Amino acid sequence: MRILVLGGGWFLGKAVIEGALARGWDVTAFSRGRSGAVPEGVETVRGDRTSDTDLKRLAGAGRWDAVVDTSSGEMSPRTVLAAAEILRPVVGRWVHVSTVSVYQGWPHQPLTEDSPLLDAPADADESFGYTGADGSPTKYGFQKAGAEQAIRQTFGDDSVVLRPGVILGPGEYVGRLPWWLRRAARGGAILAPAPAARTIQPVDVRDVAEFALERAGSGRGGAFNIAHPDPISMEAFLACCLAVTGGAGRAVWTEPDVLDEYGIRQWTEMPPWRTAEGVWSVDPARAVAAGLSCRPLAETIVDTWDWLKDNGRPVDHPRAAEHGIDPSKEEAILTGLGVR
């Protein structure tokens, strides 16, 4: 099996490459080389995927059985379409990492793969879409929906679309789990979002990578929601962070309306807290039936803490600064709540 990974120097792309090498596959990575070192044993082609010249040069290094695209990120549908069209003659299958944000109902409604998608054309530029007054839908969701359309339009039945929600694990660059681990390690009274029993469905980056590789080697396309089939509570999540780090802390479970009064931003200042009904109601049954296997989140937490202790450092990313509460703000809130 010969695969091409778009990206590969960090997080999901790196996990995909490591998983492919473990299978004995022949791997080519295409990246700018700015976000981390590609694992050894990989043929590396340097270039910018927004450049047709670089993409045509990459195509000259083909052919591949499949491409796993982990690097479309904030790119416009038009940019994704151009890459797909240039690489189509030398690629058998395209596995595209998208997002649950492409659904019209996210995050307010429970979701399956049959839920309606946002409407965006395959050739839309970066200006297409909008963000609603309540934060839903998002311009990001429209852009990713258009990117999906670009892949389906170009690859048809040879296209695979993965729609993850939150991905955690060693190498995480956004900083959701690392923030909670570092906060647990500091101990003391910890501001936490009630209800403690609210469940979440994040998945481990290595499990997403393995499923992407399974789909790359499979004969069938389609779209798949990627969410943990066995959700855990926020109480269990925080308890595990405390146990792993040895932090002498205690959770102060605080109702959402109180957190809102203090101006806590959902999804970022207290990741992954969000009160919308559907945000953690994503049905992964189709992916599970197709082979998605998710390790317990406790294992992800342990391995991420081990990575951090071993001087693990994610690539620099502006989104990391958005996550977590400033310690002085948290202390002021706890004081206001009468917690000492």
Image (tube, grey):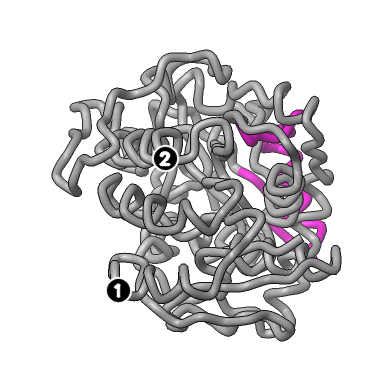
The relative height of residue 195 versus residue 50 in the rendered view (above or below) is above
Residue 85 among magenta residues? no
Question: Residue 53, labelled with which disc?
Answer: 1
Q: Residue at x 28, y 70 (%)?
A: 51
Asked whether residue 222 is in view, the answer is yes
Q: Which residues are magenta?
A: 225-251
Residue lying at 31% horizontally and 54% vertically, measured from the top left: 82
Query: Circle 1 — which element?
Result: helix
Asked if the residue under mark 2 is in contact with the one under mark 1, i.e. CB atoms within 8 Å, the reply is no
Left or right: 249 with respect to 152?
Answer: right
> In the shown orientation, is residue 70 left or right of residue 79?
right
123 horizontally vs 206: left or right = left
- Vertical placement of 53 versus 297: above or below? below
Query: Does residue 307 appear left or right of residue 268 in this picture?
Result: right
Q: Is residue 259 visible?
A: no
Residue 1 horizontal/vertical position (percent): 77, 60
The image shows residue 25 at horizontal and vertical percentages of: 79, 66
- Which image quadrant for residue 323? bottom left
Residue 339 % position (x, y): 53, 47
For badge 1, the amino acid type reads Thr
* Above or below, 38 relative to 280: below
* Mark closer to the chain start, 1 or 2: 1
Q: Residue 77: name its quadrant.
A: top left
Instruction: Give the residue displayed 79% in from the left and 70% down from the top.
Output: 21
Task: Kindly identify which residue carries mark 2.
Answer: 154
Q: Residues within 10 Å of mark 2 (few under 14, many from 20)?
A: many
Q: CA distance from mark 1 to mark 2?
A: 19 Å
